[in-house]
Amino acid sequence: MSPIDWDQPATMIDLDGKAPLIGTIRQCAQHFAIFKAEAKAQARVLLTQPVHREGRRTRTWLLEPDEIAQLVERLRAEG
């Protein structure tokens, strides 16, 4: 996945139908980090700018739970 700026606007949605979180990628990653496992499995992030994924021909507007987890790891690594 190509790098995403922390201040890019994004919306975290839940497949269970809970209210979305509208904020930045950083805020979405911070909230995802405190979710329980079942909530993490249902979470998706809708981007305002699509990102390139390795192995795919087109860019995508939606991040899956494993990709959000990568953002959480990056956030922790940056301190």
Image (cartoon, rainbow, N blue to C red):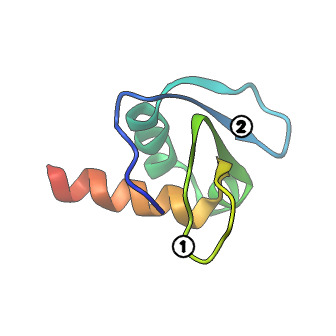
Location of residue 25 in the rendering, given as x and y in whole percent from the top left corner: 45, 36
The residue beneath circle 1 is: 54
Image quadrant assignment for residue 21? top right
How much space separates mark 2 and mark 1, taking CA atoms? 24 Å
User: Is residue 17 rendered to the left or right of residue 31?
Assistant: right
* Label 1 packing within 10 angstroms: few (<14), some (14-19), many (20+): few
**Depth check, front residue: 3 or 37:** 3
Disc 2 versus disc 1: nearer the observer: 1
- Residue at the image point whose x is 40% and y is 55% from the top: 71
The type of residue carrying mark 1 is: Glu
Location of residue 22 in the rendering, given as x and y in whole percent from the top left corner: 59, 22
Identify the disc placed on residue 78. none
User: Is residue 5 rendered to the left or right of residue 25?
Assistant: left
Tally of marks: 2
Image quadrant assignment for residue 30? top left
Q: Residue 47, relative to residue 64: is it above or below?
A: above
- Residue at the image point whose x is 19% and y is 59% from the top: 77
Q: Secondary structure at mark 1?
A: loop
Q: Secondary structure at mark 2?
A: strand
Q: Which residue extends farthest left?
A: 79
Q: Residue 42, relative to residue 24: is it above or below?
A: below
The residue beneath circle 2 is: 13
- Residue at the image point whose x is 74% and y is 54% from the top: 42
The type of residue carrying mark 2 is: Ile
Location of residue 15 in the rendering, given as x and y in whole percent from the top left corner: 82, 46
* Label 2 packing within 10 angstroms: few (<14), some (14-19), many (20+): some
Q: Residue 45, relative to residue 57: is it above or below?
A: above
User: Is residue 39 rendered to the left or right of residue 27?
Assistant: right
**Depth check, front residue: 20 or 56:** 56
Image quadrant assignment for residue 17? top right
Location of residue 67 in the rendering, given as x and y in whole percent from the top left corner: 53, 62
